[in-house]
Amino acid sequence: MAEAGLLAAYAAIGAMAVAPIYFGSFSSLDRLKSMHKKKREHDEFGEFSDSEDEEDETEAVSSEDAYMFPVYGSVALFSMYLVFKYLNTEWVNFLLSAYFAVLGVAALAQVGVRIVKGTTGLKLPLYHVHLVHRHKTMLHLRFSNLHLAMLGVSMVLTGVYLFSKNWVISNLLGLAFSFSAITLIRLDSFKSGMIMLAGLFAYDIFWVFGTEVMVSVAKNFDAPIKVVFPKDVFPADGKLQFTMLGLGDIVVPGIFLALALRFDRHQYLANLGYDKEKALPKALNGKHRGFGFPVPYFTSCMGAYVAGLATTISVMHVFKAAQPALLYLSPACILAVVATAFARGEVKQVFAYTEESKDEEKDVKPTKTVAPTHRYNLRKSVGAQATPASAGELADDEQEVANVAKVLEETVDPIANVSDTESKKPKAKRAAKKTKAKK
């Protein structure tokens, strides 16, 4: 009976690892751009919530960032080890729980909105909060009643977790974190991904086998940074014992698999002759997102991930000792992509593939400054023979231009760059001049 319960726990851990990777990878696919855009895309304050058109801000990971991953991870891990060793563990966990609770509310709410909209196709009117300073948008929030409802549900669940430390809610928070990270963190190339996986491969081996740091922090860190499942759901003594998997073993390979999926779509679109400056290919049937395409790289990489995870669990079960999962997962994912590239004859395409940064600045059309036009220039533009303007005409023109410039200087913009007090000064000066003239 105990053995059956343990196998069920392993299967549950595997399912909880694969689910956020699969759905997070597909969620990371951007909506295709084309020359034919919906009118509402130009409307900054769209009326309805449309999951097909919404784009989240993403974080790109370059080769330079990938090289530093093990360094940053090591610094953070060792710092946590020292904190737990020399400070009160209960207070540290209290502060960490509060921090993760705030993140958990946001992550759970966002995932809840995606699930409801993805399953029902629901579209609701949007509310907008727009904060502008000096003609620049500082904050623009868009939300619907669904967002508010999911926010309320996530706050309740997070509150229950803080007081009860319920393992089911802890898993929900961990899965939400994993899904959000895989969706929003994007490798810019396979080179960056392979550097990251190789670096963290060495990181995992050193901190698990070479020191006590990783195991010590994992035992003391009481926060939703792992997915767990009881080895026996109904233990005889009433005490639950858990098998667990860290979120890093889900997120790190997950963002690599998401890159493989985006490459699959890139290859499919390239074969169709897709160009974002032109209309969509007919084979897409007008769909900017949600169309089917072959996924050889994603499939092979997902199979390698499952095999690597199964190997990790098997070794852990046989030797009764914690295992660094990336020891098996990193080589499996890298080899899967490389082997698929060789089999399909696409090695050059794989290593040449890069993704555009989401942080590119929007094109801003330059404002044309209209220069003052003299009568002399007007005569030339009509096509008549150029006739020199008189000194009086030029003087009149210059006076007119000066008057216009003065009026423009005294005019306050709809969204002023100055305070209310400062913007009223020109008006007060004009009033004073009128009063003086009457006297």
Image (tube, rainbow, N blue to C red):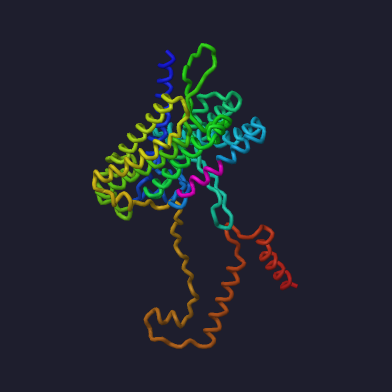
Examine the rendered structure and indicate whether residue 303 appears above or below residue 196: above
- Viewer-proximal residue, 2 or 16? 2
Q: Which residues are magenta?
A: 66-76
Could you tell me which quadrant the C terminus lies in?
A: bottom right
- Viewer-proximal residue, 318 or 183? 318
- Viewer-proximal residue, 109 or 341? 341
Residue 168 located left or right of residue 281: right
Task: Please state the horizontal and vertical placement of residue 124, each as a whole percent of the image.
Answer: 45, 36
Examine the rendered structure and indicate whether residue 377 appears above or below residue 2: below
Examine the rendered structure and indicate whether residue 261 appears above or below residue 365: above
| Residue at x 46% of width, y 68% of height | 368
Task: Please state the horizontal and vertical placement of residue 27, each as a whole percent of the image.
Answer: 40, 39
Task: Please state the horizontal and vertical placement of residue 354, each as a whole percent of the image.
Answer: 36, 52
Q: What secondary structure predominates along the stretch shown in magenta?
A: helix
Q: Residue furthest front?
A: 210
| Residue at x 46% of width, y 65% of height | 366
